[in-house]
Image (tube, helix red, strand yellow):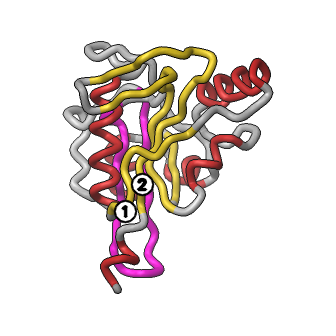
Amino acid sequence: MEKDKKNVYYVYVILDQTKEGKYMYDGRYCFGYEPFYVGKGKNGRYSIHLKSNGSHNKELNQRINEIKEITKVDPPIVKIFYHLNEEDALIEERQAIKTIGTIYNKGNKGPLLNKSFSNVYTIDYFTQPNKTTYILEHPYVSEKEVFTNKHHLTDFCKRLGIKQKSLLDGKEDNGWTLTII
């Protein structure tokens, strides 16, 4: 039973129903509408994006609002992987983003508004209950440029010259944003 509790994560894709077609990516992903965001979550995480300004990604909020204005309904969200542990969900999310491509990536242009396929850094990750996981994101800095190896948030911020207090207050610092889960 313990294993079932850990496998509660999924990977989802938000689709733009104003752009109908056959969108295939490496034969692994196929959609009837153009994808524009990939995420991972558990419970109702995917639905947060549908709220007004539900994401720290301004472009994503704008796109969702444009679609809602045109169609008068929320964009469809499909779950492409189910029953994953958090680590596997993160791996599948990154793979989907890398395969589909983002508008920001120089080498792998695609339709996604995810800031980058390699810009998510998990800091202070703990598997024990009641511990905090910090997820730092940056639109252009790749893992090749920043080696995190699960450093503590304070050390990470100090090494990169970013203000931890600003991030904890929900503010962006030099392109870095923080999500606490």
The residues tagged by marks 2 and 1 sit, at their Cα atoms, a distance apart of: 6 Å
Residue in the picture at 25% in, 49% down: 148
106 horizontally vs 138: left or right: left
As drawn, the label of residue 10 is 2
Residue matched to label 1: 83
Numbered disc 1: secondary structure:
strand
> Is 146 contained in the magenta span?
no
Q: Residue flagged by tag 2: what amino acid is it?
A: Tyr
Residue in the picture at 45% in, 18% down: 111
Q: Residue flagged by tag 1: what amino acid is it?
A: His
Q: From the top left corner, tell me how far across and down residue 181 is, in percent.
A: 50, 62
92, above or below 66, in the image: below
125, above or below 118, in the image: below
Residues in magenta, as a range: 117-139
> Is 134 contained in the magenta span?
yes
- Quarter holding residue 18: top right
